[in-house]
Image: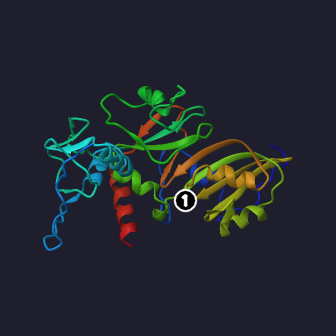
Amino acid sequence: MTGDKRPPSRNNRPARDRVGGRTGVRRPSGKPASARTKGPTEPSPDLPRRDSDRIAKLLARAGIASRREVERMIAEGRVAIDGEVLDTPATVLTSLKGVTVDGKLVAAPEQARLFCFHKPQGLLTAERDPAGRPTIYTALRNAVPPGVPRLMPVGRLDLNTEGLLLLTNDGELKRALELPATGVPRTYRARTFGDITQAQLEDLMDGIEIDGVRYGQIDANMERRTGRNQWIELTLTEGKNREVRRVLEHLGLKVSRLLRLAYGPFVLGDLPRGQAAEVPQKDVERLRKSLKADKSA
């Protein structure tokens, strides 16, 4: 628009150069934010097993559910081994042979797959809604090819937030991408109304506390302004519930539109609304290695 000027960004590059372009992977310069029988117990500390894991981790890896959801399933008596219902998520196994969930045998974990999905406004990031509102899975029926395993969202976008939502069949990959400790950056673009200065936005680099909740460092830059309307780009690594909206509203702004443009090395680009694109396997493996390296560092 004529007369619009964007205040200088810290890295002196327009937002579109950093997060725009075709859907795919960007290369960031830094870190990519009832009676039950007891099942098998953990092996003796004197006999460690390098190839064993807790059952919750194995079931998450197989795409059954997140670790927390698996632990809830075990508490509800829904998980068994060779017909014996488990009573502890601390059970350690070397494989999922003989493991059943709700009486059905669990298949061996499939290769980790990752999809970029352009979530439209008006869809819940949930598998089902008691009120009958449409969910992302309504759109995914037509967005992903037949035969794709059960996909789980990486984090959430609320009902009125649109943009990039990652989906995976691998519970461990999902968890690693979501954990604030991993430091995976998320980039958003917000259309707002109200009075704000670049200096106020830069103060968010020090973090902010709102109603007793502490929000970590946020890199926020004014994109363009027309009167009291402006677009603001924000990058954060925690991804707490409704974090962007709460922070901007705390600064006296009204958010009329919110899009997620990037999650880690993956960008929304020109992916059509309501469509999904699979991430190449080589990029998924590169991501997994990077997350493991960050965890062990």
- Residue 286 coordinates in the image, percent (x, y): 35, 57
Can residue 269 be seen from the camera position used here?
no
Q: Nearer the viewer, residue 246 or 37?
A: 37
Q: At which x and y percent is residue 249?
A: 74, 51
Residue 202 left/right relative to 143 = right
Q: Quadrant of residue 209?
A: bottom right
Kindly state the secondary structure of the residue where label 1 is placed.
loop
Left/right placement of residue 138 relative to residue 188 reads: left
Across and down, in percent, residue 263 comes to: 51, 51
Report the quarter where the N terminus lies.
top right
Tell me the residue at 65%/43% (across/down): 258
Nearest to the observer: residue 247 or residue 110: 247
Horizontal relation, residue 170 to residue 128: left or right = left
Seen at 17% across and 51% down, the residue is: 95
20 or 263: nearer the eye?
A: 263
Residue, disc 1: 238
Q: Where is residue 182 in the image (x, y as percent from the top left)?
A: 45, 63
Compared with 201, 274 (above or below) is above
Residue drawn where x is 13% and y is 43% of the image: 82
Check the picture and name the quadrant holding the C terminus: bottom left
How many discs appear? 1
Q: In this view, does 164 lie above or below 133?
A: below
